[in-house]
Amino acid sequence: MSERQAKLLAAIIEQYAEIAAPVGSVLLARLFDVSSATIRAEMARLEEMGYIEQPHTSAGRIPTDKGYRTYVNSLTLGQSGEDRGARVIEARVSSNADAADQAIRQAVDTLVELTHNLGLATIGNQLYLSGIGNLFAQPEFTGGENVRDVARLLDNLEPWLREASPNQPLNVFIGSENPIGRDSGVSLIISRFRSPYSDDSYIGVLGPTRQNYLKVMNLIGETGKMLERIL
C-alpha cells in the first residue's frame, strides 16, 4: 500500500465513523485537493486489495475488517486529546476508591457516556454491562440485522474472557476477529488490569466497527491503567 493509499484509507474510515454513510470520491477529492478521477482510481486499488468495499445501494465505499485492522495497527496512541475524558473517569473512580465494585461500575458508566458504546467490565465472576441501548441505537443495528449475533456475543463474553484471558494491556477485536458473533459487525476494545478481584480483570466497550478507534482505544487504555493504580 502506498503512502497516499494509506492516507486515503484512514480518511475513508474516519469519515465513515463521522457520517455513518458510504464515503464518495467527491468528498475525498476535496479533502485531498485532487481530482475525483484520481480518488476513484486509488479507491479501486484499495478495493482490489480488500481494504474497502462498495455496498450494493451506494456509489461510496466503506471499510472492511481488513481495512480497519490495517488502520488500527497504524495508530499511535496517546494523541487523541482524551485527557479531559480520562480526568472525568479518574475523578469518579477516586471518589469510590474504597469500594472497588462501585469504582469499576462508575468507570464503565462514564465510558458509556463518553464513547456512546456499550460498556462492560468483569467484577469478580460477574460481567457488568451498561448502555446496551447505545449499541442497538446505532444505524447498523436499527434494522434488526446482526442483532442476534450481537446477543450471542454478549451471552458468551464473560466465559470467553475467563477462558481466553487476552494477555495484552489493550486488546482490539474487529468484526470477524471476535471469537463469538463473528458476523455481528461490532468491535470489542478491552483493557486488562489488576483489581482486588483478579489479575485478569477487564474493562472496555463494544460498539460498531464504525467508530473513532484512536479516541476509544486511548480512553480504554488509560482507564485500565487508572483502575489498576487507584484500586
Image: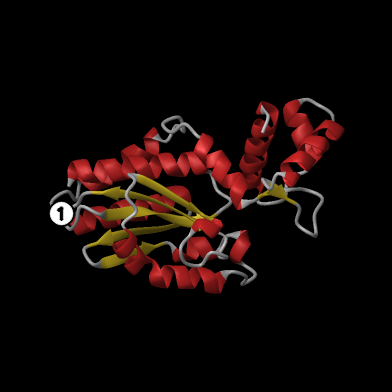
Element marked by disc 1: loop
- Picture layout, residue 86 above or below residue 154: above
Residue 5 versus residue 144 in the image, above or below? above
Q: Residue furthest top?
A: 33
Q: Identify the image quadrant of the N terminus.
A: top right
- Mark 1 is on which residue type? Pro
Rendering coords of residue 173 (x, y %)? 47, 53
Q: Nearer the viewer, residue 96 or 32?
A: 32
Q: Is residue 44 left or right of 80 when viewed as pictured?
A: right
Does any portion of residue 186 appear in the rendered image?
Answer: no
Quarter where residue 18 is shown = top right
Placement of 135 over or under 93, stated as above or below: below
| Residue drawn at point x = 74 percent, y = 27 percent | 32
In the rendered image, the vertical position of residue 115 relative to residue 153, given as above or below: above
Q: Is residue 34 visible?
A: yes
Q: Is residue 31 left or right of residue 180?
A: right
Quadrant housing residue 196: bottom left
**Residue at 45% of width from left, 44% of height from top?**
216
Place of residue 89 in the rendered image (x, y in percent of width and height, measured from the top left)? 31, 44
Q: How many numbered dots are placed on residues in this image?
A: 1
Please state if 195 lies on the left or on the right of 52 as rendered. left
Residue most toward the right? 37
Residue 33 image point, x, y percent: 77, 25
Which residue has dot 1 on it?
Answer: 196
Looking at the image, residue 25 sits to the left or right of residue 80; the answer is right
Q: Which residue is painted at 61% across and 67% down in the image? A: 142
* Image coordinates for residue 157, horizontal then vertical, percent: 38, 66
- Residue situated in front as seen by the camera: 211 or 4: 4
